[in-house]
């Protein structure tokens, strides 16, 4: 166990030694600055408290005179956060109150704590439990062995302060993990703080963990850990660290939601206490609260180094707070359409014939496919940017064979570099000093796939520039603009390192220890790859990168997946909370290896996995080298058929996915959502993580159990909405849990009344072939006969949409009239797609025909047919171009 | 670049105009008759412009203008043969000069030229070139070559079939004969058994008086030759120790043995820890001294077996008991006669019986008997020997019968064309390995740099589809992979004038795929290649 965690966890509640020094207060338009004093150590700190846009405050604390600079990361945030003018600052001897709009923060002088109010209600309280700890930098006490007692006396004589206990901690200046030694040359430098969320029932976020979406109390267990690690055969329902780390935590209760973003890239542990799983909440310290039943969530963040830099996001609704987080760290740029289609991967497709055969088989079995993936074996002895020329003598031809059918290739590029004097990359990196160094300043040497390896230092701008150059098409032979990139092992994974990662005392560019930057290491890597792919096409095509490691803000560069999972029902089940958790933490582009990476799924698990994965954003089958082949046709005819239907279903909803991803880019809302995000006042939804919503119109509840004949579906909306089975259009009016019978052929999916969902019903070989195909609209009326929905259209590949080349449509049904209007009137895009069909569930009665009116088509009468069996009215072939505004009136 | 984009934009606009234009009729206008797009002429009567169209499944009647109007009205997709509107539709390309073909309607206008006559991309962003005559010529050439091959191969196949049938007939008559022999041998055995029993009764009465004599030397006498052998082979033991000690640690460990198929006593494809412990005399590791003193005695027979010096135990599934070398020496002959392995592997029971009976044999007397007693003893010995001979004969007969029965039961193809290939072996060498396929026997792999054979599977059965049963063979129960399944091989057969192993790959770890060409599969009458279209 890390010694800093022990020290932080040992801090006694209610005895904080920190107090503000009100006389030092300086204020400007949007920020106050004030000194903070630790009476146990006599150390001074500087507190900066800033008002930001979108109901957000930032608290920044650093030592006033640190021995040397402490690490402050600059790569997670999208830009400098946008500050906003404070309404007022009031100072008394007890406190300082800052006000911005409906939000207010009271900084208590002694003991130091900060209470944040939203609309007059206490929402977040920082250091309320007094668990703040900020270990100041110090020189290593010089102790000669025989004089150790003397030395301590000397130390004590020098100061009147009792100290913070770190000096005497044997783990503060060096520590061992198994056979590994951490030299800790800078000694103790941990930072920690507690946050309380009165009124909140549950906490969420702080991915990545293979655990439930709602965080559990850690009162009697290890805290949640954020430390990017390559975990072999990870287990489910564990809070141990995995490949990625996003230190954002949300708290939610019926009344409001809020969140904190702990902006720290070092190893971090988080203790959670929740009133929901504790009868007595010992941690509630003197909250002035009138409510009778007190809900509360408490969190305690502990990081090994860095500074305290926290963003408080005050909501008040779930979608508000999720948006506030993406305002800070950015949203995912709209992916190319192919990224949302189906991906076929394996460790490994053996050679270029193998690749050709697999692609061909997708045609033979009439299955859509976007991308074939190549894992590490395509390289010449794991030397990235090279090919095994025996197996892949002509990669460009292989790529062209794929692209001729609208498909792409993704190849893996990992950050470890083979130490081989015949490898140009190794020679360049050695000669130019581009590797991460060990504590003695020599190139760090670890062990990974190629054997002895070193690691490029992506904190060095020169390294990034060099690495970006490697992707240029004249340098990386065998690639074209249709070859995209998979960055794996970027935690980084070091087979012979502590916990299979790098030593903490390695040294990065600028002299920063690996300890300081570990959790953002993988992020730096994909950031460089993004730049490389962006430049490769001259800024025209949208890059696609898959990453395993990630940090806050990684959504700006890459898609992530849940790493090396297993062909087990529990792993299928956990893929939902895992992806929901990263989705609310800014990264909607999430998927899990379909079928499970390790081991072989049976056909039932395989089918259920596909059916569930249809509704996760990133849809890729991948498997370990020692598993059986498992392309969709390798089981039996029925399995192939069911998987084919699942794929077709996915493709038919791509217009909805694509629209939601565009909306995510604009407003930060997650594409897949847990139910509580859309239904914040229904407490039953708070712990549901085996359902998800696609945007707010679809509700999905996969089958996660073998042999299931029914599943319990929770219908949210408190009887105000009706849910329609997307297949049969059967309505479900009753709110709450309903048992729905299931067969192997499908899982329950429902569309909400009042919504309009765009689909494409012509499923092709790939999304490229479907680009110009016509649209079908599925309209479900609400109790007032109304419905609405959006549709976004562009070229599906390029950044031209950022120059106004797109269509963003608002489609509504109101008063028997369906209307399509352009939301962005200035944008335009020449599309060949037209409106093929409209299905209206629960339509107005007695409709005989419909009349279309548009500028280019004038008035046209359309055929309608009513199907009494499912109560659906179909409008036949309006045939109007999607780029045009139009109305269709339903006529009696 | 700009220029290019402009052109493509114009093309796109043009295409959309074209689409609008086509949207209404959706037919191919020619100078003669209006041909409905996407169907062969033969289906024209079902699509008559002068009347309403009835969906081919009879589900609906629609105006004829709705045929190929790019909207799916019929549940069976029959109203849109020429467009992509119906998910389950098919598009017909005439491909004049080449082969006509149906493609899924989703391939129409998808930017991929699927029909060589370009008819599927009539409103597409790609420009297709009609290359039917070229392809047709190539295809016909290919076809001719294939037919030529099939014809030539077929001649060989016919020969193979004739050979196979002869073999089968021979086997049958041989089997019939053996069955008669067997019955006779049974009778003889019974007779000899009675004689033996009688002789032994007389002998035991006679021996009563010599009863108390009882030496317990058996074990000692049996061990001594073994010990001698050990001493003699000490240098060999040391050499072998060095080979086994692959990490040069000075000890041979269980793990080191587990990497060697030699020690797979029960031939299940893997060396279990138990098996390894047996050889190391229940120690996890042994030093050189221990190895020479104890372990070598256990290892030696298996090593000899592996080196082919010791054929005797080759067929022994259960060779658990440490057999003294002279003991196995006389078994050698009988085993050589009953060489064919598969059968013996399954029939372990008789061997056990055999061993037991041998153990039960009374020891050679050490005592000097009087003449009369000695005569009785000799007589009894003689009777026992005669009886043993009959037992042996019966075992041999049984074994041969079993082999024949198995061969006769085995499916050698509809006309026995594979029968004469049984037991034949073929090799294929790639960059790293030499692969070997012994038909109806086993598949194996050997590193080019040496080392022992790794079994990739034993004959299991034909596994082709019902229609093409003899196109695939499966060999399974090969050596178990570390942390994985037992190796297995699927052999895909094709027609060729030569019996040849064409390729070997490993698509999944420990699952091998071999391609084998053989005249046995050249049968023009049931040739499948012609019908095997894209769809």
Image: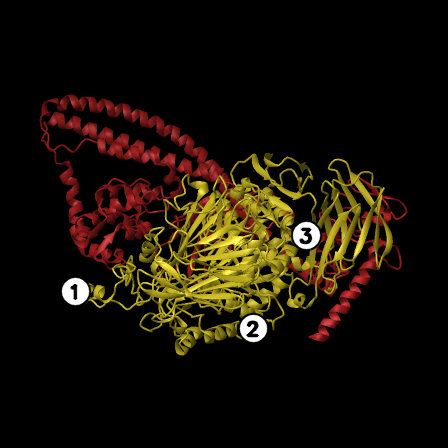
Chain colours: A yellow, B red
Please tell me whether mark 2 sits on a helix, a strand or a loop. loop
Tell me if A568 is positioned left or right of B310 in this view: right
Q: Is residue B346 visible?
A: yes
CB atoms of marks 1 and 2 within 8 Å: no
What x and y, as percent, mark residue A858?
Answer: 87, 56
- Residue B515, position as x, y percentages in the image: 52, 54
Q: Mark 3 or mark 1, which is nearer the start of the sequence?
A: 1
Q: Is residue A318 left or right of residue B125?
A: left
Relative to B351, residue B40 above or below: below
Q: Are marks 3 and 2 in contact (CB under 8 Å)?
A: no
B495 vs B63, nearest the viewer: B63
What chain does badge 1 belong to? A
State which mark lies toward you, 1 or 2: 1
Q: How far apart in space, not on screen, are marks 3 and 2 (Cα)?
A: 32 Å
How packed is label 3: few (under 14 Cα within 10 Å), some, or many (20 or more)? many
Which residue is situated farthest in the bottom direction here? A431
Task: Give residue A227's position: percent from left, percent from top.
Answer: 41, 57
Residue placed under numbered mark 3 in the picture: A763
Q: Which residue is mark 2?
A: A473
| Secondary element at image label 3 | loop
Please name whichever residue, A26 or A65, is drawn nearer the observer in this view of the structure. A26
């Amino acid at each position: 166990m890390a010694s800093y965690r022990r020290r932080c966890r040992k801090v006694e509640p209610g005895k904080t030694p920190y107090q503000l020094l009100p006389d030092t207060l300086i204020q400007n338009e949007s920020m106050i600055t004030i000194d903070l004093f630790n009476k146990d150590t006599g150390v001074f700190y500087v507190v900066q408290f800033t008002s930001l846009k979108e109901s957000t405050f930032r608290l920044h604390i650093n030592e006033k005179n640190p021995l040397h600079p402490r690490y402050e990361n600059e790569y997670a945030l999208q830009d400098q956060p946008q500050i906003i003018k404070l309404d007022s600052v009031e100072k008394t001897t007890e406190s300082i109150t800052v006000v911005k709009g409906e939000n207010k923060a009271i900084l208590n002088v002694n003991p130091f704590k900060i209470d944040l109010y939203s609309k007059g209600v206490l929402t977040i309280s920082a250091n309320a439990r007094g668990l703040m700890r900020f270990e100041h930098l110090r020189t290593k006490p010089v102790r000669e062995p025989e004089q150790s007692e003397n030395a301590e006396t000397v130390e004590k004589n020098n100061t009147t302060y009792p100290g913070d206990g770190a000096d005497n901690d044997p783990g503060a200046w060096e520590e061992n993990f198994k056979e590994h030694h951490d030299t800790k040359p800078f000694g103790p430098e941990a930072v920690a703080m507690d946050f309380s969320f009165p009124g909140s029932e549950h906490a969420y976020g702080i991915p990545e963990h293979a655990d439930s979406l709602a965080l559990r109390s850690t009162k009697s267990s290890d805290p949640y850990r954020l430390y990017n690690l390559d975990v072999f055969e990870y287990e489910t329902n564990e809070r141990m660290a995995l490949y990625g780390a996003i230190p954002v935590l949300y708290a939610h209760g019926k009344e409001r939601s809020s969140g904190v973003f702990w902006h720290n890239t070092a190893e971090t542990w988080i203790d959670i206490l929740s009133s929901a799983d504790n009868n007595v909440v010992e941690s509630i310290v003197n909250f002035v609260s009138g409510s009778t039943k007190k809900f509360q969530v408490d969190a305690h963040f502990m990081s090994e180094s860095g500074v305290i830099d926290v963003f408080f996001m005050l909501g008040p609704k779930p979608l508000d707070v999720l948006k506030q987080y993406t305002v800070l760290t950015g949203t995912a740029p709209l992916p190319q359409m192919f990224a949302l289609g189906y991906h076929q991967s394996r460790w490994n497709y053996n050679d270029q014939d193998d690749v050709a055969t697999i692609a061909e088989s997708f045609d033979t079995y009439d299955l859509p496919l976007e991308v074939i993936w190549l894992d590490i074996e395509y390289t010449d002895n794991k030397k990235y940017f090279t090919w095994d020329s025996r197996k892949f003598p002509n990669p460009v031809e292989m790529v062209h064979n794929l692209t001729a059918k609208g498909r792409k290739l993704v190849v893996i590029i990992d950050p470890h570099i083979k130490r081989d004097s015949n490898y140009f990359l190794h020679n360049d990196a050695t000669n130019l000093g581009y590797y991460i160094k060990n504590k003695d300043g020599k190139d760090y040497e670890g062990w990974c796939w190629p054997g002895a390896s070193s690691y490029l230092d992506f904190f060095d701008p020169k390294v990034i520039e060099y690495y970006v150059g490697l992707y240029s098409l004249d340098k990386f032979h065998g690639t074209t603009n249709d070859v995209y990139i998979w960055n794996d092992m970027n935690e980084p994974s070091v087979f012979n390192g502590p916990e299979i990662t790098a030593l903490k005392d390695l040294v990065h560019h600028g002299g920063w220890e690996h300890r300081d930057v570990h959790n953002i290491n993988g992020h730096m890597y994909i950031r460089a790859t993004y730049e490389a792919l962006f430049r490769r096409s001259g800024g025209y095509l949208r890059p696609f990168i898959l990453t395993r490691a990630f940090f806050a803000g990684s959504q700006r560069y890459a898609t992530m997946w849940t790493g090396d999972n297993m062909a087990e029902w529990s792993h299928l089940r956990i893929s939902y909370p895992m992806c929901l958790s990263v989705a609310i933490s800014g990264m909607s582009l999430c998927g899990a290896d379909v079928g499970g990476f390790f081991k072989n799924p049976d056909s039932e698990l395989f089918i259920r996995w596909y059916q569930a994965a249809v509704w996760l954003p990133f849809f890729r089958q991948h498997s370990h080298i020692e598993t059986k082949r498992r392309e969709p046709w390798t089981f039996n005819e029925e399995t192939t058929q069911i998987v084919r239907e699942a794929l077709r279903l996915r493709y038919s909803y791509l217009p909805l996915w694509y629209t939601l991803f565009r909306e995510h880019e604009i407003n930060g809302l997650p594409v897949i959502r847990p139910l509580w995000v859309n239904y914040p006042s229904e407490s039953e939804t708070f712990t549901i993580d085996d359902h998800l919503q696609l945007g707010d119109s679809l509700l999905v509840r996969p089958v996660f159990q073998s042999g299931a004949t029914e599943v319990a579906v929770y219908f949210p909306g408190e009887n105000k909405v009706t849910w329609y089975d997307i297949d049969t259009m059967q309505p479900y009016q009753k709110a709450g849990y309903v048992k729905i019978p299931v067969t192997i052929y499908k899982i329950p999916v429902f569309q909400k009344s009042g919504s309009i969902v765009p689909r494409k019903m012509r499923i092709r070989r790939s999304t490229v072939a479907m680009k110009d195909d016509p649209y079908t609209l599925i309209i479900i009326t609400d109790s007032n006969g109304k419905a609405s929905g959006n549709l976004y259209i562009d070229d599906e590949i390029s950044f031209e949409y950022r120059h106004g080349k797109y269509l963003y449509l608002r489609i509504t049904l109101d008063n028997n009239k369906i209307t399509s209007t352009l939301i962005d009137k200035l944008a335009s895009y020449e599309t060949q797609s037209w409106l093929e069909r409209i299905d209206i569930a629960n339509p107005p009665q007695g409709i005989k025909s419909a009349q279309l009116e548009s500028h280019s088509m004038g008035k046209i009468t359309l055929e309608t047919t009513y199907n009494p069996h499912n109560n659906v009215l179909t409008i036949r072939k309006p045939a109007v171009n999607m780029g045009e505004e139009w109305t269709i009136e339903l006529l009696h | 670049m700009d220029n290019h984009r402009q052109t493509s934009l114009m093309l796109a606009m043009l295409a959309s105009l074209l689409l609008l234009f086509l949207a209404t009729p959706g037919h191919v206008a020619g100078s003669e008759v209006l041909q409905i797009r996407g169907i062969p002429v033969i289906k024209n009567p079902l699509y008559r412009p002068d009347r309403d169209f009835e969906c081919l499944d009879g589900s609906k009647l629609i105006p004829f203008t709705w045929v190929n109007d790019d909207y799916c009205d019929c549940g069976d997709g029959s109203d849109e043969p020429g467009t992509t509107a119906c998910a389950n539709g098919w598009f017909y390309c005439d491909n004049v000069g080449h082969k006509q073909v149906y493609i899924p309607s989703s391939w129409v206008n998808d930017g991929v030229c699927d029909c060589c006559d370009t008819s599927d991309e009539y409103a597409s962003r790609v420009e297709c070139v009609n290359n039917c005559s070229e392809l047709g010529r190539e295809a016909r050439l290919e076809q001719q070559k294939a037919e030529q091959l099939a014809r030539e191969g077929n001649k060989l196949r016919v020969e193979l079939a004739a050979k196979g049938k002869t073999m089968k007939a021979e086997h049958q008559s041989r089997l019939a004969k053996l069955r008669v022999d067997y019955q006779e041998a049974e009778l003889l055995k019974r007779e000899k058994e009675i004689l033996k029993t009688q002789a032994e009764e007389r002998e035991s009465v006679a021996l009563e008086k010599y009863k108390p004599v009882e030496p317990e030397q058996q074990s000692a006498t049996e061990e001594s030759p073994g010990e001698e052998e050990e001493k003699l082979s000490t240098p060999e033991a040391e050499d072998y120790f060095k080979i086994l000690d692959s990490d040069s640690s000075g000890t041979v460990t269980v793990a080191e043995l587990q990497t060697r198929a030699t020690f797979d006593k029960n031939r299940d494809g893997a060396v279990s820890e138990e098996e390894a412990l047996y050889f190391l005399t229940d120690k996890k590791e042994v030093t050189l001294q221990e190895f020479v003193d104890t372990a070598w005695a256990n290892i030696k027979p298996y090593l000899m077996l592996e080196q082919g010096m010791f054929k005797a135990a080759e067929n022994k599934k259960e060779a658990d008991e440490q057999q003294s070398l002279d003991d196995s020496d006389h078994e050698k002959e009988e085993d050589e006669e009953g060489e064919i392995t598969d059968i013996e592997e399954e029939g372990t029971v008789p061997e056990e019986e055999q061993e037991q009976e041998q153990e039960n044999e009374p020891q050679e007397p050490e005592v000097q008997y009087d003449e009369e007693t000695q005569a009785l003893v000799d007589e009894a010995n003689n009777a026992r020997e005669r009886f043993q001979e009959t037992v042996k004969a019966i075992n041999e007969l049984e074994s041969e019968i079993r082999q024949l029965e198995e061969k006769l039961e085995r499916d050698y193809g509809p006309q026995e064309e594979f029968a004469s290939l049984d037991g034949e072996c073929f090799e294929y060498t790639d960059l790293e390995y030499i692969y070997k396929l012994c038909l109806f026997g086993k598949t194996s792999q050997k590193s080019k740099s040496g080392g022992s054979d790794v079994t990739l599977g034993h004959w299991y059965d034909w596994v082709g589809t019902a229609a093409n049963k003899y196109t695939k063979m499966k060999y399974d129960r090969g050596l178990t992979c570390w942390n994985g399944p037992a190796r297995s091989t699927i052999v895909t057969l094709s027609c060729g004038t030569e019996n040849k192993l064409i390729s070997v790959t490993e698509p999944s770890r420990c699952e091998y795929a071999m391609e084998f060409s053989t005249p046995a599969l050249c049968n023009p009458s049931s040739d499948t290649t012609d019908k095997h279209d894209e769809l």
